[in-house]
Amino acid sequence: MEQGLLDSVWVLLSSFLVFFMHAGFALVESGFCRKKNAVMVLLKNVAVVGIGSVVFYAIGYGVMFGSGNPFMGTSGFMPNGSEENVGTLPIFVFLFFQLVFAATACTIVSGAIAERARLGTFFAFCAAAVAFIYPVVGHWVWGGGWLSTMGFKDFAGSTVVHAVGGGMALAGAIAVGPRLGKYDEKGQSRPMPAHNFPLAALGVLVLWLGWFGFNGGSTVSAADPGAIGRIVLVTNLAASAGFLVGLAWAKLRFKTLDLSMALNGALAGLVGITAGCDVIGPGWSVIVGSIAAILCIETVLFLDKRKIDDPVGAVAVHGACGIFGTLAVGLFGTDIGLFTGGGAAQLGTQAIGTLAGFGFAFATGGAVWYALKLLPGGIRVSEAHELEGLDVTECGAAAYHEDDASMGELSPAPAE
């Protein structure tokens, strides 16, 4: 079988796994939110795929991979299939792989503004993010831009996808403000517990599975099965360590086995290994996942103390751990890391790149959010709708009708 066909099959299979990650995000976000907002969360997660697909095809791909300048591409919009292959891959195979990544970055934002943001303005933000914010940073790193010429390394997107998504999410959480009742008069956080842990746990496992395509498919080639096997192994080890250390750290900090923190610890490990999964060895990947889990939990607590409300921990998981994961390349990457004989040079390059990516996403994301805030209706639902729940008031449907006493017609008839 010719190499181009093998590569295309592998990249398409990986693309399908990454696409399936949206199911994982939908389950995690809806499970971590309150049941009165589950339908709205699900609607946003499905809509992101549609918006991201159309906008990235029409605009984002050209900005990210078109020829232009070190800052952004200015050509290659709306490919028609006549373009040259990207390596051994037909243009549409490569485009689809990149498209599912782009949608993922916006899904990160959805969780941070859940339960109080207006649907229309979120859709508008997604379009802006996929057209400009995400692909500009992608061009810097993967499209031949200024960071790639510096030697910055981000194999599968700890910065390009996760830190960028985290930066946009942080800007959104600040702009939209905390949920009603989240903080009391003294600024103390009130618990708003997840309504469905089975959904959240299943969602994390779906994401865990999808990450093997996310990281493994970033080889964009099946030529070296050994390299793919190593990437998949270290990805799994980092997630496993993240879950276990997250559970242990939660027990130490909160005196309880907190499943939500452990689940986010697994995701933190996955985000942390994403940039360096091609150069970080199995042993070091356990260290990366462990540190990422602790960093995630501490970031959740840090943001909560500053009254930045993030219902699912998206900023901590993707923003903080995306930055750390990018730095991990310069700390633990084979022959290039500070602790693996490579000195501090790569670490410095990594720091410049990830802070530039996160900073650009936060600044431009904030500008878009505050611009949308000026529109009629702003970016937040009414207080009455928020208190009642967005499922009924905004979507006209409840997620759990069996709890509704008005559904008496579904009850069995009394015995004669």
Image (cartoon, helix red, strand yellow):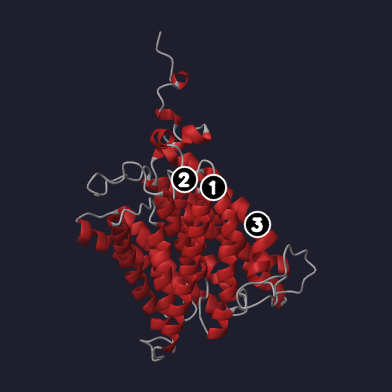
Pointer 3 residue:
55
**The residue tagged with tag 2: helix, strand or loop?**
loop
Pointer 1 residue:
121
| Quarter occupied by the C terminus | top left
Label 1 neighbourhood size at 10 Å, few (<14), some (14-19), many (20+)? some
Q: Residue at x 35, y 54 (%)?
A: 308
Give percent across and percent down for residue 388.
Answer: 40, 33
Q: Residue at x 31, y 53 (%)?
A: 307
- Relative depth, front residue between 407 and 64: 64
State which mark lies toward you, 1 or 3. 1
Give percent across and percent down for residue 295.
Answer: 32, 67
Residue 140 in the figure: left or right of residue 366: right
Dividing the picture into quadrants, the one containing residue 318 is bottom left
Residue most extreme to the top = 416
Cα distance in 3D space between marks 1 and 2: 8 Å
Q: What numbered label is drawn on residue 117?
A: 2
For the residue marked with disc 3, what is the amino acid? Answer: Val
Q: Residue at x 77, y 71 (%)?
A: 83
- Mark 1 or 3 closer to N-term? 3
Give percent across and percent down for residue 97.
Answer: 62, 65
Work out whether residue 398 can be spotted.
no
- Relative depth, front residue between 361 and 371: 371
In this rendering, is residue 312 above or below 394?
below
For the residue marked with disc 2, what is the amino acid? Answer: Ala
* Number of marks present in the image shown: 3
Work out whether residue 183 can be spotted.
yes
Give percent across and percent down for residue 338.
Answer: 37, 87
Q: Are marks 1 and 2 in contact (CB under 8 Å)?
A: yes
Residue most extreme to the front = 374
Cα distance in 3D space between marks 1 and 3: 16 Å
Cα distance in 3D space between marks 3 and 2: 21 Å
**The residue tagged with tag 3: helix, strand or loop?**
helix
